[in-house]
């Protein structure tokens, strides 16, 4: 029943899994990105199913934002939160951070890869391209960059789902 009440943004699926975002998570990430002049880090929680990953909410990590610059963010920790709703386990799936510089790529740096490889989380997410795209990587090293809907459209339109395209 909880899923009937949520609005989702569906991002075009890879061959193995769909990546589904609650529209409010994207709104939080896009707004945070647009109002910061330094990188930020946070935690994405949701449901990991065999056919899809569903990101339901975002909580900022405990990284000190005063230590963030336009090229790095301080490493923080995520709350180890686990809920069960309608038989689904909702838990920490990924850390997300931003690449804030205009010329930064939507690809992980060597430091990003070290952080991802050093934690046990199943996914790696980077918000990039001025908040208009997201890099997604899983433990099998499957990688894609997805276009995201404009921030205004997330709040102006009342939609059930929004399908976007793979950028590369």
Image (cartoon, rainbow, N blue to C red):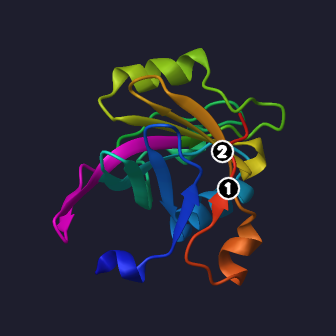
Q: How far separated are the C-alphas under marks 2 and 1? A: 7 Å
Residue 86 magenta-highlighted: yes
Image x and y of residue 50, in percent? 30, 45
Q: Residues within 10 Å of mark 2 (few under 14, many from 20)?
A: many
**Rendered view: 55 above or below 4:** above
The numbered mark, 2 or 1, whose residue comes first in the sequence reads 2
Where, by quadrant of the figure, is residue 83 drawn? bottom left
The magenta segment: 79-96
Most common SS among magenta residues: strand
Dots 2 and 1: beta carbons under 8 Å? yes
Residue placed most toward the observer, 16 or 121? 16
Quadrant of residue 136 within the rendered picture: top right
Percent x, y of residue 26: 58, 61
Front residue of 146 and 77:
146
Task: Please state, as top left, top right, bottom left or bottom right, where the C terminus lies in the image.
Answer: top right
Taking 65 as reference, is 56 above or below it?
A: below
Q: Is residue 98 left or right of residue 104?
A: left
| Residue, disc 1 | 164
How dense is the environment of label 1, judged by Cα within 10 Å: few (below 14), some, or many (20 and up)?
A: some
Q: Looking at the picture, how far across and down is residue 107, in whole percent?
A: 65, 27
Task: Determine which of the numbered discs, if any, sits on residue 146 in the image.
Answer: 2
**Residue 71, labelled with which disc?**
none
Horizontal side of residue 129 vs 93, given as left or right = right
């Amino acid at each position: 029943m909880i899923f009937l009440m949520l609005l989702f943004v569906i991002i075009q699926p890879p061959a193995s899994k769909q990546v589904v975002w609650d529209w409010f998570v994207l709104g939080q990430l896009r707004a945070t990105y647009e109002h910061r002049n330094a990188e930020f880090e946070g935690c994405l929680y949701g449901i990991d199913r065999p056919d899809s990953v569903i990101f339901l909410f975002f909580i900022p990590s405990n990284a000190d934002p005063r230590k963030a610059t336009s090229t790095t963010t301080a490493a923080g920790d995520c709350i180890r939160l686990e809920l069960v709703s309608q038989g689904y386990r909702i838990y920490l799936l990924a850390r997300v951070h931003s690449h804030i510089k205009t010329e930064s790529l939507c690809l992980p740096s060597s430091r990003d890869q070290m952080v991802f490889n050093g934690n046990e989380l199943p996914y790696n997410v980077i918000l990039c391209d001025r908040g208009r795209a997201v890099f997604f990587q899983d433990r099998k090293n499957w990688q894609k960059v997805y276009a995201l809907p404009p921030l205004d459209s997330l709040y102006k339109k009342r939609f059930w789902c929004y399908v976007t395209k793979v950028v590369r």
